[in-house]
Image (spheres, coloured by chain):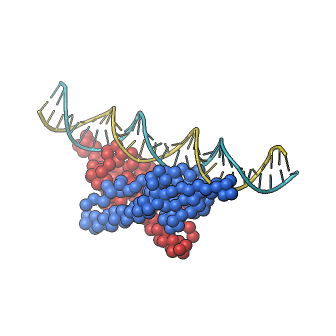
Chain colours: A red, B blue, C cyan, D yellow
Amino acid sequence: MMPFKEMAKLDKIIHEPARLSIMSALDACTMAEFLFLQELTGLTKGNLSSHLSKLERAGFLMIDKQFVRRKIPHTTIRITREGKNAISSYWKQLDQIREITKQWEKKNK
Amino acid sequence: MMPFKEMAKLDKIIHEPARLSIMSALDACTMAEFLFLQELTGLTKGNLSSHLSKLERAGFLMIDKQFVRRKIPHTTIRITREGKNAISSYWKQLDQIREITKQWEKKNK
DNA sequence: CAATTAGGTTTATGATGCAAACAAGTTCAT
DNA sequence: ATGAACTTGTTTGCATCATAAACCTAATTG
């Protein structure tokens, strides 16, 4: 079996570093506020916002925007079951590919 | 320590799935012909060609084009020492991030 | 009341990955 | 021997994407 083709099948939504860090943080936290997530990931507000939208469209998280005293926005992000599955199987897939690569390497020596 | 920011520092040249598979294959083979590499990775010739150029410009591999009986092109690709270092430290870095993520997760439970 | 801060979103642009088109030569069929 | 099809790649064009800058609305501060 040749593992190299499998790498192309890695979920690109998750694979992108900014989103990988968002999803990893959320996988650990389950839920987080926008600004906390920004601190964790070091992303700018703009990038964080657009990556969150993309992850939301993918069904990997839910964005809950509340208004404190009806005024100040306060955004809470929650990972979904689908999101937890996605990142968990991302790592699983990557590990498998690496394992198979090692074996392939041995065999071809 | 917060591992999530570190993900943004992963070498983007290596990180891209097509190139990750090229570099993994070359790391195992040390050298390979264009068509063999195409078979291993499942990439189209066009994509393989342009990814190889990018990896060559990055100094991660060397492209040696020979002409069989002075006519038919025959391209051999060889990973460089720099390329071997790059992919090895890519995996090392990823492992570290994952390890720290796990610890961070525990601490915050 | 003007300026600045808070908490995000939208826009613009520069880079990127990909497939389709192209190139340069060779072999095969007729 | 001529042209159709195959080899072995490279170049081009398009569509997507990531990012920073600009923007928005409300609140606070001087």
In the displayed structure, does residue B29 sit left or right of residue B3?
right
Q: Can residue A21 be seen in the rendering of this structure?
A: no
Q: Which residue is farthest front?
A: B70
Which quadrant: the N terminus of chain B?
A: bottom left
Q: Residue at x 55, y 73 (%)?
A: A108
Q: Residue at x 36, y 59 (%)?
A: A24
Find residue B4 and report its image quarter: bottom left
Please name whichever residue, B19 or D24, is drawn nearer the observer in this view of the structure: B19
Q: Residue D27, image x and y in percent? A: 20, 38
Q: Residue C3, image x and y in percent? A: 19, 30
Q: Can residue A25 be seen in the rendering of this structure?
A: yes
Q: Residue at x 31, y 55 (%)?
A: B5
Which quadrant: the C terminus of chain B?
A: bottom left
Count of marks, rendered view: 0
Above or below D8: residue A88: below
Above or below A37: residue D29: above
Q: Residue A6, image x and y in percent? A: 53, 63
Find residue B88 and report its image quarter: bottom left
Q: Residue at x 29, y 54 (%)?
A: A40
Q: Residue C28, image x and y in percent? A: 80, 56
